[in-house]
Image (spheres, helix red, strand yellow):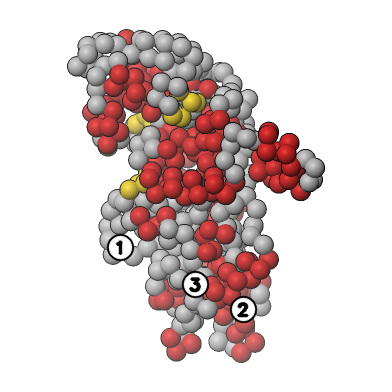
Amino acid sequence: MRNLASIALACTLAGLCAAPALAQTSSADGIAQYRAMLADGNPAELFEAKGEDLWKTKRGPKNASLERCDLGKGPGVVKGAFVELPRYFADTGRMQDLESRLLSCMETLQGLDAKQIAATGFGRDEQKNLEGLVAWISAESRGLKFNLPQAHEQERRSYELGKRAFFFRGGPYDFSCASCHGEDGKRIRLQDLPNLTKNPGDGVGFAAWPAYRVSSGELWGMQRRLNDCFRQQRFPFPGYASDVTIALATYMGVNSKGAVSIAPSIKR
Amino acid sequence: MHSKHKKMLALAGGLTALALVGCASLPSSAELDAEAKALFKSSFREQGIAKMDRVEQDLAQQACSGEQPPDEATTKRIEAEQMATIKWPAGGQYLGDWREGEKLAQNGRGMTWTDPAGMPSGGNCYNCHQISKAEISFGTIGPSLYQYGKLRGVSDPAAPETAAIVQYTWGKIWNAKAYNACSGMPRFGHAGVLTEAQVRDIMALLLDPKSPVNAQ
């Protein structure tokens, strides 16, 4: 049964099957079915287990764990932290998303070099460890609703900057984030595009990342997702945990208020 | 939403002071615009063929970067300026080979920082448009182009009575902003994404009566 469905899907995805345009609905159904089967055994669990270990393991020049890391709800509080990020942190004096906050904790608590980690390519060295950490920390908020704080002036400013970044058109194709994610019910090829200018629904868009990517066997955090969006937008390279990425996450996160997080989810 | 709300309050005259108090902690909309622009410069770096000039906006990009479209005068100015950039085909040769056009329409590659310099780009057409009947994996950001020529009565693309639609189609592919200032479509010719020969082939896919777009 499983194999049959997989073959049918591979056929659809590769566009090799001769089928009339009317087959549109059934191929979309096929993909939905494929995703449901994948979600049955989400390999993100392996990353979650690794992340929990990493959180509790003494590492780095200071031989310390991350258990005193403050993700916004007090030192060591993990549950519920993810659905309130990005937020303003008084100790660093800046807006931080999960990944940027982890860099701060790895530096202050463990003595690791945050700058060097930010400059490391995705999926390598400490970036590999970050995959596990974001998987576990986001999983600790699974089923909770996004509720980013907007009380601090910096949080409202970040939202306003993120909105501007979202609509910023540039590059040889004149694309902005809104080119693909500004309207309801649009697709690129057969891929449905969430409208990120509002709450696109539970477990959709911002509420679906981090995610395990079947096609590459990797766990992608929001930073890597945004990075690949900008690549496809034909933009230059956004710095890891740079201000523009955090502002965009604030914009999408605030828009997603009330959406249930299913992270880490599973994606093709 | 927030800035719109602020503007409405400001218009109400007597309530201006209230608006200022209510938003005292946030900079003005113009200051935030400038800050966002600076954010782009500081947050990005060049990578491969994707240089920093890609976040320098021209008027069309800048004016179409808001939630609302630009005013009418700006819209007209953009469209006139973009119209003047259109390079019409050498020798009035508008159509190439629809088979090559179909390959280009399928090809979504090119111009990212992982693409090598000098690699020809694809047309990305199916990412956003339905085109031929056979390809069911098409996007919906742009309108369907299935039977594009047929629906417009093009039975002979070289006939004088079809000149207007043929020229419009060339212009639209070369620089979509000439006809719609904030069009979502890339300016394929103007931005150097596609060559003149490639545009000819895509023209043939859309307008040649023998192309599967019109024949099926």
Q: Position of residue B186 (x, y in %)?
A: 49, 62
Mark 1: which secondary structure?
Answer: loop
User: What's the residue type where badge 2 is placed?
Assistant: Ile
Q: Is residue B211 visible?
A: no
Quarter-of-image position of residue A117: top left
| Image height of B172 relative to A129, above or below | below
User: What's the residue type where badge 1 is placed?
Assistant: Met
| Image height of B40 relative to B124, above or below | above
Dot 2 falls on which chain? B
Q: Which residue is mark 2?
A: B165
Q: CA distance from mark 2 to mark 1?
A: 31 Å
Q: Position of residue B52 (x, y in %)?
A: 35, 55
Q: Which residue is mark 3?
A: B174
Dot 1 falls on which chain? B
The numbered mark, 3 or 1, whose residue comes first in the sequence reads: 1
User: What's the residue type where badge 3 is placed?
Assistant: Trp
Q: Which residue is mark 1?
A: B119
- Classify 10 Å Cα crowding around label 1: few (below 14), some (14-19), many (20 and above): few
Q: CA distance from mark 3 to mark 1?
A: 19 Å
The numbered mark, 3 or 2, whose residue comes first in the sequence reads: 2
Q: Position of residue A108 (x, y in %)?
A: 30, 19
Q: Residue at x 33, y 48 (%)?
A: B45
Q: Is residue B81 visible?
A: yes
Query: Looking at the image, do the residues carrying marks 3 and 2 touch, with CB atoms under 8 Å apart?
Result: no
Dot 3 falls on which chain? B
How many numbered marks are there?
A: 3
Query: Looking at the image, do the residues carrying marks 3 and 1 touch, with CB atoms under 8 Å apart?
Result: no
Q: Residue at x 30, y 15 (%)?
A: A109
Quarter of the C terminus of chain B within the rendering: bottom right
Query: Horizontal placement of B1 versus B204: left or right?
Result: right
| Image height of A154 relative to A21, above or below | above
